[in-house]
Amino acid sequence: MACSASFVWEHKKLANRSDLIICRTDKGKGVVLLNRIDDIEKINSILSDPSKFSKVGAPEFSTIFKIEDKINRTLRQLKDGSAISENTYNSLFSSGFFATLCGLRKVHKDDIPLQPIILATYNSPNFEIAKHLVPLLSHITSNHFTLQNYSSFVPDILEQNSHTFMVSFDVQSLFTNVPVFEAIDIILGKLFSAQNTIYHGS
C-alpha cells in the first residue's frame, strides 16, 4: 500500500513540473516524458517554414471575417450564375473559426520529431466546402495502383510471386509538404481533361 501511495505521489510531482510534457506514445501503449522547451522549439521550427505557413498580420478575428467574406462572395457568384443551387449555397455558407494545430510526437523515431496535425477542422471557414468536394473528387483519386482497404490488400498481396518486394515510403509531414498550387493544377487537369467539360453543382 505504501508503495502504491509513493507511486501516486511521484506521478503527481511529475505532472506538476512545468518543464515536462507527459503524453501517450503515437504507436502502441505507453507514456512518454518530454522536455517542454524542446517540444516548443520543434513546433516553432515547423511553423516558421514560410513555404508551409504564413503569419497572420491582422488580429485573428479580422482575418477570419476576411476569409469568410471571400468564400461567401464566391459562393454568391456561383449561385447567381446558376453553378450551384440555393440549397448548396446555404449548406456551404461559411461561418467558423480557425482550426488548431498540434504536434504528434513520433516517439519511435530518432530525436522524436513532430508531425503537424490539424484538430477541430469542422470549425474552420472552408470545412463545408472541403466536405462538399470529397465526393466530386473521389473518382480521380483511384487507379489500378490503388487499394481501398485491408480487404482488397490481402487477396492482392497473395497473388504476387516470390520475386515481388513490398516497400513502404515514409513521407515526413505529408500534408504540410503537399505543393498546394501544383496539386490544384493536377486536380483541374484531371477534372477537365476532355474539352468542354462542365460540372453542375447540385
Image: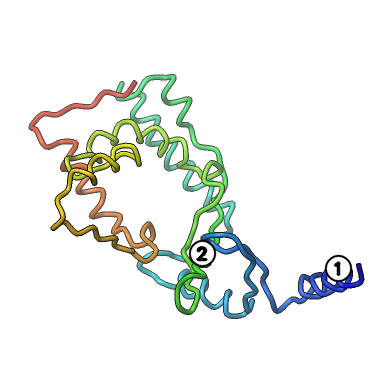
How far from the left and from the top, in percent, is residue 143? 18, 40
Q: In the image, what residue type sits under mark 2? A: Gly
Number of marks drawn: 2
Specify the quadrant that holds the N terminus: bottom right
Q: What residue is disc 2 on?
A: 57
Which residue reaches farthest left?
195
> Of 132 and 78, which appears nearest the observer?
132
Question: In the picture shown, does residue 143 fall above or below 182?
Answer: above
Q: Name the residue at 49% across, 57% down.
A: 117
Q: Name the residue at 26% across, 23% down.
A: 200
Q: In the image, what residue type sits under mark 1? A: Ser
Which residue reaches farthest right?
2
Label 2 sits on a secondary structure element that is loop
Q: What residue is disc 1 on?
A: 4
Quadrant of res 71: top left
N-term-proximal mark, 2 vs 1: 1
Q: Name the residue at 47% across, 75% down.
A: 45
On screen, residue 113 versus residue 138, left or right, reads right
Does residue 81 appear in the picture of this structure? no
Front disc: 2 or 1? 1
> Of 16 and 61, which appears nearest the observer?
16
What whole-number distance in Å separates the C-alpha atoms at marks 2 and 1?
A: 52 Å
How far from the left and from the top, in percent, is residue 31? 64, 66
How far from the left and from the top, in percent, is residue 62? 56, 52
